[in-house]
Image (cartoon, grey):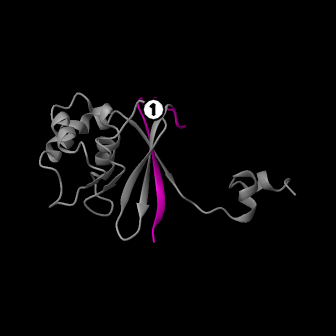
Amino acid sequence: MGGFSKIFCISGEVYENYESVHSVQLFIFAGEGNRQWYEPHYVSKNIKPIGKIHTIIPAGVNDENSLLDACIAFAPKLFDSCPTLKKIQAELEDSKSLSLVEDEIPNDWKQLRREAAPIFETLNVSKIKFIPLNTDQRYLGSDNKKDLKNLR
């Protein structure tokens, strides 16, 4: 049995010195179990996956390309200018999941990664880690003890 360990928030624009999440287009949930996996949760109705892909399996645990791969698979519109994208979309048009384990990776995926990397670097990406709250923190969603002392 597995569960989610973190969420990535993908926004289209980067704002300098802006620490909150702005214009989120897509959440990517990272799951942990027998294998690590990613699945999309869309905010923007304009973003659709390649084919019918609803899950990707990265090459390995914490693979350095896993978030880039997830963004390409779940939000190809962000990478429209990549020449190899259309070929990959045609190859995966009926796919419901995508495994990026070395012997299962689509033929031109590595080339698409190289093309998509500069675009990926311009995206605003944030990470939310799941942290269990103690009983007091649950009331205000705060981890500041002084915020909690007037609660009861």
Residue 92 % position (x, y): 22, 45
SS at mark 1? loop
Quadrant housing the N terminus: bottom left
Q: Is residue 123 magenta?
A: no
Q: Nearer the viewer, residue 90 or 106?
A: 90
Q: Is residue 20 magenta?
A: yes
Residue drawn at 70 percent across, 52 percent down: 142
113 sits left or right of 70 in the view: left
Residue drawn at 79 percent across, 55 percent down: 148
Residue drawn at 40 percent across, 51 percent down: 39
Residue 140 % position (x, y): 74, 51
Q: Nearer the viewer, residue 145 or 22?
A: 22
Density class for disc 1 (Cα within 10 Å; few <14, some 14-19, many ≥20) is few
Q: Nearer the viewer, residue 49 or 33?
A: 49
Q: How many marks?
A: 1
Q: Does residue 3 sit above or below 116 in this rendering?
A: below
Identified by mark 1, the residue type is: Lys
Q: Which residues are magenta?
A: 1-22
58 sits left or right of 39 in the view: left
Residue drawn at 42 percent across, 60 percent down: 31
Q: Does residue 141 sit above or below 80 in this rendering?
A: below
Residue 74 % position (x, y): 35, 42
Residue 37 % position (x, y): 36, 59
Q: Does residue 35 sit above or below 111 in this rendering?
A: below
- Pointer 1: what residue? 45
Query: Which of the 4 quarters of the picture holds residue 48?
Result: top left
Quadrant housing the C terminus: bottom right
Query: Which of the 4 quarters of the picture holds residue 79?
Result: top left
In the orientation shown, which residue stands out farthest toward the front? Answer: 94
